[in-house]
Structures are given as C-alpha cells and as structure tokens.
Image (tube, rainbow, N blue to C red):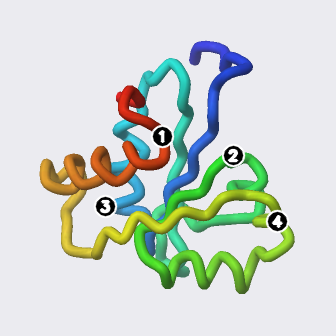
C-alpha cells in the first residue's frame, strides 16, 4: 500500500448494511492519489459496523440518508465533534457498483470535493 501523503483526506461512507451504497462509494476512491476511503454500516448485521475508531480516523463523514446521521449523533456524539457529517440523500434502492449509483455518488460528491476529485 502506498504511503499516505500529507495532503490526503480520509473519507468515511456510511449506510445501513455496508453492502451496496457505502461500499460502492469506497470503491470509487480505490487508488486515488488524494483521498483514502473506508465504509461502514449502522445496523447490527452490517458487513463492517461503524465504530468510534472509524469516526476518529475520518476527516469527513458521508452518510447516505438522514437516519444514518441521526444514529451516528446518538451513539457517537463526542467522536463527531468538529467533524463534517454530510448527507448525500441516496436511497436504499441500488445494488453494489450499480452504474446509476456510481453516477449519483459522483454528482453528489462533486459538490463537496470539487469538480476534479475523480
């Protein structure tokens, strides 16, 4: 794994099960020179369940739905202090790596990461 440069931002993507939406978002950043992405889910059966460690690691936290932000704020208020939590408003209706989902993620992330993030 290449070393993380000092200008690298760490992005955390959150959905419910960490199987489709957040995992797809994480994959969009594989090999990116300026961003490192991880993903997790809020539900007990999630592939990877979000922890305080995930939130501490992240520079920015992106949730797919408002309910995910609410859960994080309830369970991890101290860990979220001073960290941006951004809701992408992406409903749970897509499969992993769905092309429409990837396009929607690129569109919504452009607003927060800038035009040239990809």
Name the element at disc 2.
loop
Q: Which tag, 3 or 2, sits closer to the chain's start?
A: 3
Q: Which residue is mark 4?
A: 81
Badge 4 marks a residue whose secondary structure is: loop
Quarter holding the C terminus? top left
Residue tagged 3: 20
- Local secondary structure at mark 3: loop
Please state which of the two labelled residues, at mark 3 or mark 4, is closer to the viewer: 4
Name which of mark 1 and mark 2 comes first in the sequence. Answer: 2
Disc 2 crowd, CA 10 A, few/some/many (<14, 14-19, 20+): some
Q: Are marks 3 and 4 in contact (CB under 8 Å)?
A: no
Label 3 crowding class (10 Å Cα cut-off): few <14, some 14-19, many 20+? some
Q: Residue at x 63, y 26 (%)?
A: 8
Name the front one of labels 3 and 2: 2
Residue 113 tag number:
1
Q: Quadrant of residue 61?
A: bottom right
């Amino acid at each position: 794994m290449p070393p993380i440069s000092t200008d690298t931002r760490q992005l955390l993507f959150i959905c419910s099960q960490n199987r489709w939406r957040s995992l797809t978002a994480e994959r969009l950043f594989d090999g990116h020179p300026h961003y490192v992405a991880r993903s997790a889910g809020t539900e007990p059966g999630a592939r990877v369940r979000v922890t305080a460690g995930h939130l501490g690691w992240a520079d920015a936290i992106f949730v797919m739905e408002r309910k995910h932000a609410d859960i994080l704020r309830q369970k991890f208020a101290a860990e979220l202090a001073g960290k941006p939590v951004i809701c992408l408003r992406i409903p749970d209706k897509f499969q992993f790596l769905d092309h429409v989902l990837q396009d929607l993620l690129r569109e919504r992330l452009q607003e927060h990461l800038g035009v040239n993030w990809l």
